[in-house]
Image: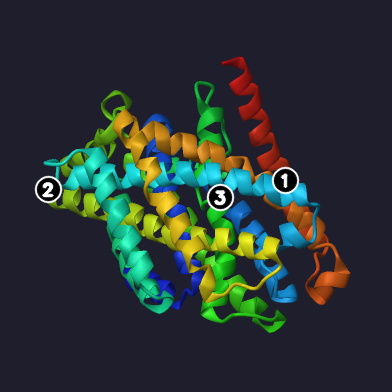
């Protein structure tokens, strides 16, 4: 089974980076916290979220294959100017949160493996190291590094899930019987929707498609297979993390101790080796996500500025790319010294949920314009799926707004 999984991972193109970038802080911490608090009860929400993210990613990839234009440029060229300005403001805010979130998650992983340094220091070390790796490496080399990290995280985490999983009946019930726990279940689902499979990172797929050289309607079947495998892997991985964390005592799993407490449970179940395997997989997961986000998100800034200038992307846009990279890696490190790493990750996941209704609504509009997409325009099933995304993420955002108003 493991060999078959590794073969599928090797067959992934840009979807591999998409999976790595989306899994990191959102899946590793939010899914773990969900497993600690609710056990396998919310597995269905993880599977649903992965399915919804597939629908959105397939739709934005279809737009790009049909028109040759990224979704970022479409927000500039096909909508009133306020749409792209609003997105740009959100992007700056979100980038700060995602930088803090990933640095916090890497800090938790580093401190769990080598506790001589604190979470903030390990977070800063990972952020700086990832910045240099991304700035100095080309896409082909970068993809090889991501494949190595994904192979490590897949092997480690899936093995640990097999060792720690509750009875199969509980797992199947959690996957197939949707339930919302009365105490905090709604907030947990919100965090899963914002974290599993990424949020703004979804549109980075456009730039990895371009780097892979995939363009034109004839590539649609290849792209769909790539995205499908990416989200099957994402959903499986989120479920595995939740199962591993189930059974950990919630009062012991706070802040930087979350990975250690989960690893301690595995040690009690299967011995010291299982503890080390989990911590290695946890580190590979969050560091792969950091590399994916550091590499992809600056391309959104470059594309947005180029669209406003009505110019194609060129090598002269390198300073914009590097500036965005520094913004991701530098200023957010201040938040690490507030000593609330898990809270930062959960806050980022919730903020990410606000982006998804916007993406779903604009894709519903764009992909129904047959004059622009021709035969790749939405059909009935595509419209139903995107409408479900819009309704689901819209309800999530409405709940969060109401919750924030009541606090």
Q: Residues within 10 Å of mark 2 (few under 14, many from 20)?
A: few
Nearest to the eye among marks 2 and 3: give it: 3
Q: Nearer the viewer, residue 263 or 84?
A: 84
Q: Which mark is residue 223?
A: none
Q: Report, in whole angstroms, how far the alpha carbon at label 3 lies from the one at label 1.
A: 14 Å
In the picture, residue 11 is in which quadrant?
Answer: bottom left
Does residue 302 lie above or below 128 as drawn?
Answer: below
The residue labelled by disc 2 is 272
- Residue at 56% across, 73% down: 209
The residue labelled by disc 3 is 199
Residue 293 visible, this angle: no
Q: Report, in whole angstroms, how far the alpha carbon at label 2 lies from the one at label 1.
A: 45 Å
Q: Position of residue 399 (x, y in %)?
A: 64, 28
- Residue at 43% across, 31% down: 38
- Residue at 31% across, 69% down: 148
Does residue 3 lie above or below 96 as drawn?
Answer: below
Q: Report, in whole angstroms, how far the alpha carbon at label 2 lies from the one at label 3.
A: 36 Å
The residue labelled by disc 1 is 390
């Amino acid at each position: 089974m493991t060999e078959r999984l590794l073969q599928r991972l090797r067959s992934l193109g840009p979807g591999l980076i998409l999976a790595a970038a989306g899994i990191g802080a959102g899946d590793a911490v939010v899914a773990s916290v969900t497993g600690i608090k609710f056990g396998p009860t919310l597995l269905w929400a993880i599977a649903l979220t992965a399915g919804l993210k597939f629908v959105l990613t397939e739709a934005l990839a279809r737009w790009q294959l049909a028109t040759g234009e990224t979704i970022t440029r479409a927000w500039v060229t096909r909508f009133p100017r306020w749409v792209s300005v609003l997105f740009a403001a959100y992007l700056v805010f979100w980038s700060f949160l995602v930088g803090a979130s990933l640095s916090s998650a890497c800090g938790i992983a580093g401190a769990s493996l080598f506790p001589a340094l604190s979470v903030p220091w390990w977070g800063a070390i990972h952020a700086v190291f990832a910045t240099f790796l991304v700035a100095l490496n080309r896409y082909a080399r970068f993809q090889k590094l991501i494949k190595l990290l994904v192979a490590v995280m897949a092997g480690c985490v899936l093995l640990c899930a097999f060792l720690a999983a509750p009875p199969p009946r509980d797992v199947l019930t959690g996957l197939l019987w949707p339930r919302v726990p009365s105490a905090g279940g709604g907030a947990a689902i919100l965090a899963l929707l914002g974290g599993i499979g990424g949020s703004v990172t979804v549109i980075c797929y456009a730039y990895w498609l371009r780097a892979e050289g995939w363009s034109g309607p004839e590539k649609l079947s290849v792209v769909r297979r790539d995205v499908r495998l990416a989200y099957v892997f994402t959903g499986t991985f989120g479920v595995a993390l939740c199962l591993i964390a189930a059974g950990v005592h919630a009062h012991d799993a706070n802040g930087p101790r979350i990975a250690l407490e989960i690893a301690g449970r595995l040690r009690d179940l299967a011995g010291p080796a299982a503890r080390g395997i989990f911590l290695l997989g946890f580190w590979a997961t969050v560091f792969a996500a950091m590399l994916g986000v550091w590499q992809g998100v600056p391309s959104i800034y470059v594309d947005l500025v180029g669209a406003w200038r009505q110019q194609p992307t060129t090598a002269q846009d390198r300073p914009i790319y590097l500036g965005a990279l520094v913004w991701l890696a530098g200023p957010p490190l201040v938040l690490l010294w507030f000593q609330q790493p898990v809270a930062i990750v959960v806050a980022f996941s919730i903020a990410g949920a606000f982006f998804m209704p916007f993406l779903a609504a604009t894709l519903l509009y764009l992909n129904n314009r047959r004059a622009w997409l021709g035969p790749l325009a939405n059909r009935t099933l595509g419209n139903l799926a995107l409408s479900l995304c819009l309704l689901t993420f819209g309800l999530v955002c409405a709940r969060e707004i109401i919750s924030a108003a009541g606090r």
